[in-house]
Amino acid sequence: MKCDGNKPMCNQCVRFNRTEECEYSEVSTPSTARVLEQHIARLQSRIHELEQDDPSAVRLHDPHAAYKQSEASTSRPQAGQEWWDMPEPPPQITRNIVNRFLPFATTFGFFFDKSAFLTALFSPTVSKPRPPIVLRNVVYLWGVQLSTEQEVQSRVPIFLNRALRSIHVALSTAQQQDTLYVLQAEILLAYFFFHNGRLAEGKFHSNAAVSLAIMCNLHKVAAPQRRGSQDVLFDANTFLPPPRDAVEEGERIHAFWTTFVLDKCWIVALGSPSILIEDQGNSSTRIDSPWPQNMEHYGQRPISPNPGCTISKFLETLSSGNDGGDSSRLATLAKAAALYERADRLASLWEKDIMANQEDFVQLDSCIERFKQTLPAPERLQSPSIEMLHSLLVVHTLSQCATIQLHVRFVMQSSASRGRCLSAANAVVRIAQVLPIQQMRNVSPIMAVFYTSTHDILLGGLRSLRSMRSDWASSSAMPGYEALETTLKHLVTITEHFAISSPIMNSQLAKIRQAHAST
C-alpha cells in the first residue's frame, strides 16, 4: 500500500480495488482481505477517538453511569446488582425491552425478518442460533430508548456504551458469519444517533454501514456473474458465507436497500458526499441487486438473476411514462430516496453551471412527478397498520421533498420553481393531515429534516406575500396569504406531535419557532 503520507485511504479506491493513483489519497491493494483489515482498523481508531475525553474532538457524549463489564454470565442478578448492570438482562426484561423496539423496528432500519429474529432470540436452535451479542446489545439499546418508563430510559448511557463496545469487539474479530449482523448493528446505531440529534456520530456509523455493505458486495446480490473478461462482477458473497436459501438471500437484498435509503437521505440532509457512488461505466460500482420484495416472497420461490443496472433502468422506465413495477414498501422507499438524492445532486451541478443541460433537469422533474402518481393513496387504505402508516408518511413526504431539492436553489430567479416548491410543501402538510398521525408515536429522524425544509419554503412564501402586501399599501390580504399561514400552523402542530418522542424533531421545532419569532 503506497500512501501520500498525509491522507487516509480513499473510500473509492478501497471499493473499486483501484491500483492507479487517485486525487484523494493512496494506491489500494488488490487484496480484499487486506482492504477489510485496514477498514476495520480505521473504524476501531475512529471509535476509540469518539470515546476519548478530548473536548476538542467530535466524540460520543460521556455516559454519566458507565457500564463496567462483568465476567459473570449468569442471568440472575448478584446481591445488590440491578438488571441493567448484568451482562445481559434477565429473560422477562429482555422480552419487555425487545417488544418496545420491534413495532418500530423498520422505522429505524431493521431489515431482518422480525418473527424469525424473535424465535432465534428466545428459542435458539442449532440451525437457527441466537443472534450475536453485537446485534442484541443495539436492539436492547433501542428498547431502552423507546421505553415509556423514565427509570428504564435513564439507563440509555449504559446500554449505549455496551453497544459501542460490542461493535468494537465485532469489528476486531470480523467473524464471517456475523458480518450481516454487524451491518445491522451499524445501521441501528446510525439511526439511534440521528434520532437523538447527534449528527456527527450518526454520519460516522452510517458511513461504516455503507462501507460494510459495499465490501460484502451487497449491491451485487443475485447479479449475473461473468468470468474471463475485464468486465467481471465481484462475488456477491465476499466476506459473507453463501446464502443457505432464498430467504437468507432476500435478507441480503433488504440489507443493501436499507443501507441505500439511510445513505441517500442523510448525505443530502448533511450536505456530505456519498461513499455509494454509481458509475455506469464501471461494472464494479453499478447497483445490480434487484428491488426488494416482501420477506414472505422469498420463502415461496427462488430469486431469479437480476439483469442489473437497477437504478438506471428504474429511471429509464419512469422517463418512458411507466411506473417502474415493484410495490414492496422498502422498494418504494428506496426509489424515492434515489430520486431525492439525484434531485439534490443535479440541482447542485446546475447551480454551479457544471452541467447546464435543461433537458436533464426537466426529465428528472417529470420522473419525480410520475413517481408520485404511482404511490398508494392513503385515504383508500382500510385499517392500515402503524408500520404501513409510517411507510406512507415517509415515502409521500420524501417524494415531495425530492421536488423541493430539485427546485429550491432557483426560487429567487424562477417563478416556476417557487410554484413547484410551494406546491410540494403544501402536499407534505396535507399527507400528514390525511393520515392519522395521532396513532404514530415514533417517526424516522429524517422526517425532522423534511419538515424543516418544508417550513423554510412555506415561511419564505409567506414573507414574500407580506412584502407584496405592504408594497400595495392595502389592508386586504393578498390571495393565498391566509391559506399559507394556516398551512404553516398545521406544520408546526405536526412537528410538535412528533417532537414529544423525537429529540431531533424537538430541536428542529425550536429552530422553527425561532424563525417564526424573527418574522
Image: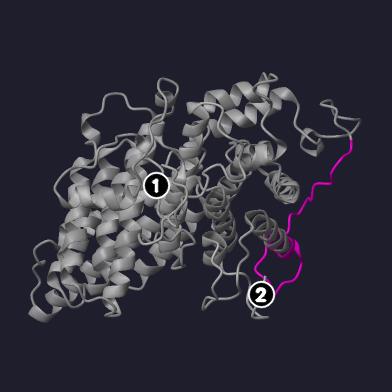
User: Would residue 329 be found to the left or right of residue 253 on screen?
Assistant: left
Occupied quadrant, residue 55: bottom right
Q: Residue at x 66, y 31 (%)?
A: 131
Secondary element under disc 1, as helix, strand or loop, is: loop
Instruction: Select label 1 or label 2 by which is in front.
Output: 2
Occupied quadrant, residue 204: bottom right
Q: How many numbered markers are drawn?
A: 2
Q: Residue at x 61, y 67 (%)?
A: 28
Q: Residue at x 31, y 49 (%)?
A: 397
Q: Toward the viewer: 10 or 442?
A: 10
Q: Tell me residue 416's x, y (percent).
A: 13, 68
In what quadrant of the picture does the N terminus appear? bottom right
Disc 1 residue type? Asp
* Residue span colored magenta: 46-71
Where is mark 1, residue-wise? 288
Label placed on residue 29: none
Residue 222 painted magenta: no
Disc 2 residue type? Lys
Where is mark 2, residue-wise? 2
Residues packed near mark 1 inside 10 Å, few (<14), some (14 to 19) or many (20 plus)? many
